[in-house]
Structures are given as C-alpha cells and as structure tokens.
Amino acid sequence: KLNVIVFILCEQNEKSHTTRFYNEIVDKLVLHHSKVNDNLYVGSCPRLIEHIEYMKNQLNITAVVNLQVISDIENNCKQIIAHRQPQPLGTLKTVVIQDKAYDVSSVHELKLVYDQHQIIFTWLPTVDMSTIGRLLTFPQAVLVLKNLLVNKHRVYVHCNAG
C-alpha cells in the first residue's frame, strides 16, 4: 500500500512517491482514476485497449487530454499501439522544432485508436515531474480543458501515473 501520509509530511519527495505509485499501476496494468466532477476525470494513462473501452463505455469519456511526452507514450502505450497495423517505411510522422526532427508516429497511432473509439484526442506533452514543464503547459491546458468542458465533453486528463 502507498503511504500518502508520509508524502504529505514531506518525509518523501514527489519523485519517490510518484515512482512507487507508477510502478504499482504498471505492474498491475490497472487504470487508476478519480472523478473531479461529472465531466472531468484525472488518472493514469490507459495502457490497454480495454482501458480505452472502459473509459468510453463505463465513464462515458468523449475527450482525452494526454500530457505524456513521446518516450512515455512509446513506453506506456505499447500494447495499445501494437493493435494497429505498422506504418510502411517512409510514412513516419515527423515534427521539426528548432531544426530537430521528432518522430511522432506513436502519438499519431495512439490518436487513431482514440478516433476509432470516437474519443477526441488532445496531446499536450509535458515533462513528467517537472515544475517548469507544468508551468509551460498549464496555460494551454487550461484553454483546451475549458473549451472541451464548455462544449459538453466528458474529459479524462492523464500523464503517466495520474
């Protein structure tokens, strides 16, 4: 069991607490989530197609805000992406930022899975456990989330562990 009281009393840092929680979720392949209100859930990343189906059919999720960076999607969503047919060589999706190319094929494949389930997929990559990363992403995340909620979507927001 996770000792939340120890974390609150600052006897552990965020990284060690989150890492233990993350490892527990990964080992059990569970989708851990909390209901914030009727239209907003926060939680761990879906790791299986069954998690996406649960979100769609049991939680009635209509939109997902994914805060994972590319490497986290590749590491944590392998089993979801594996259900899709691999792209032929030469069709990789790349994005160039400041003269550096990033392969976003895994993000694109994940989006296609959400599309198949009629769930809107929004990607706002945020470095995990980084205060600066959170500060940089926060304004965009607020705008995206507000727009989704105003348009009557039921939204699931996630990073890796939740």
Image: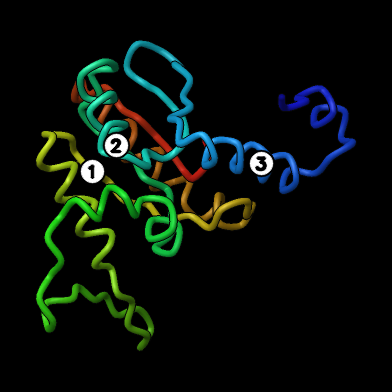
Image location of residue 111, percent across then percent down: 20, 50
Query: Gap between marks 1 and 2, in whole Å?
Result: 5 Å
Q: As drawn, is 55 to the left or to the right of 26?
A: left
Mark 1 lies on residue: 121
Disc 3 to disc 2: CB gap under 8 Å: no
Secondary structure category for the residue under label 3: helix
Mark 2 lies on residue: 64
- Residue drawn at x 34%, y 55% is 78
Depth check, front residue: 44 or 86: 86
Q: Neighbour class for label 3 at 10 Å: few (<14), some, many (≥20)?
A: some
Q: Amino acid at mark 2?
A: Val
Disc 1 to disc 2: CB gap under 8 Å: yes
**Between disc 1 and disc 2, whose residue precedes?**
2
Q: Amino acid at mark 1?
A: Phe
Which numbered dot is residue 43?
none
Image location of residue 89, percent across then percent down: 13, 81
